[in-house]
């Protein structure tokens, strides 16, 4: 497992919230808003520790809720729960396989709206639900699954570009004595 820098993940969260609020084409074409924070949480859960997951859940959730109709903080607990569950099992997951990334992105993007609905029902809000909500849930889930491997490639490449290469220790000691024969 390689660690990415937390500031890269938080910058990506800021950009993801901005793109979701600004870029209306997927919402107009597909009829649903594509969620980029959930695939980013999958990336953070597989590449970072609990501190980055908590920061991403707080920062990303509050930023997303400030630009949506959700009450403030409604997305924080679901993001944190998804990140925590994936992070607890990250050593059992083949995180470098795009199939696993797709499956995790699909599952997390499917769970996120359901968890947010549970939070909204808990605090007494009544969101609009209907048959069209199933279409939106399906679109958000599939788009989250497709975006997750792309996000992994992009952020891993950015992390490699902004990090020093790993310095591997030498296989021999520099103060060793070399025994030579007669010749």
Image: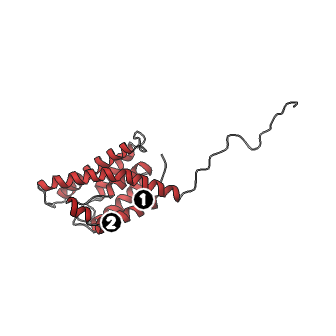
Q: Which residue is mark 1?
A: 9
Percent across and percent down for residue 26 are 25, 61
Q: Nearer the viewer, residue 120 or 6?
A: 6
Residue 119: percent from left, percent from top? 22, 56
Tell me what residue is drawn at x 23 percent, y 56 percent. Answer: 116
Residue at position x 67%, y 43% in the image: 170
Q: Would residue 47 be found to the left or right of residue 19 on screen?
A: right
Q: Judging from the image, what secondary structure is the residue with disc 2 in?
A: helix
How far is the residue under mark 2 from the one under mark 1?
15 Å
Name the image colouring: secondary structure
At horizontal 34% and vertical 53% (from top left) the residue drawn is 147
Front position in the image: 104 or 158 = 158
Q: Which one is earlier in the sequence, the residue at label 2 or at label 1? A: 1
Task: Determine crowd level at label 1: few under 14, some 14-19, many 20+ residues with C-alpha closer than 10 A.
Answer: many
Circle 2: is it few (<14), some (14-19), or many (20+) Cα within 10 Å? some
Residue 66 percent coordinates (x, y): 28, 68
Image quarter hosting the C terminus: top right
| Position of 178 relative to 125 (above/below) | above
Residue at the disc numbered 2 = 19
């Amino acid at each position: 497992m390689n660690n990415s820098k937390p500031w890269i993940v938080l910058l990506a969260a800021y950009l993801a919230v901005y793109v979701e609020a600004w870029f209306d084409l997927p919402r107009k074409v597909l009829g649903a808003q594509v969620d980029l924070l959930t695939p980013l949480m999958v990336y953070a859960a597989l590449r970072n520790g609990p501190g980055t997951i908590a920061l991403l859940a707080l920062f990303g959730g509050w930023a997303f809720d400030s630009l949506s109709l959700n009450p403030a903080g409604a997305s924080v607990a679901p993001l944190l729960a998804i990140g925590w569950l994936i992070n607890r099992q990250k050593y059992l997951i083949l995180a470098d396989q795009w199939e696993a990334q797709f499956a995790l992105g699909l599952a997390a993007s499917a769970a996120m709206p359901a968890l947010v609905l549970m939070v909204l029902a808990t605090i007494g809000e009544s969101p609009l639900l209907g048959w069209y909500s199933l279409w939106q849930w399906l679109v958000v889930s599939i788009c989250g699954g497709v975006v997750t491997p792309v996000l992994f490639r992009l952020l891993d490449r950015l992390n490699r570009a902004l990090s020093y290469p790993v310095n591997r220790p030498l296989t021999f000691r520099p103060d060793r004595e070399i025994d030579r024969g007669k010749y």
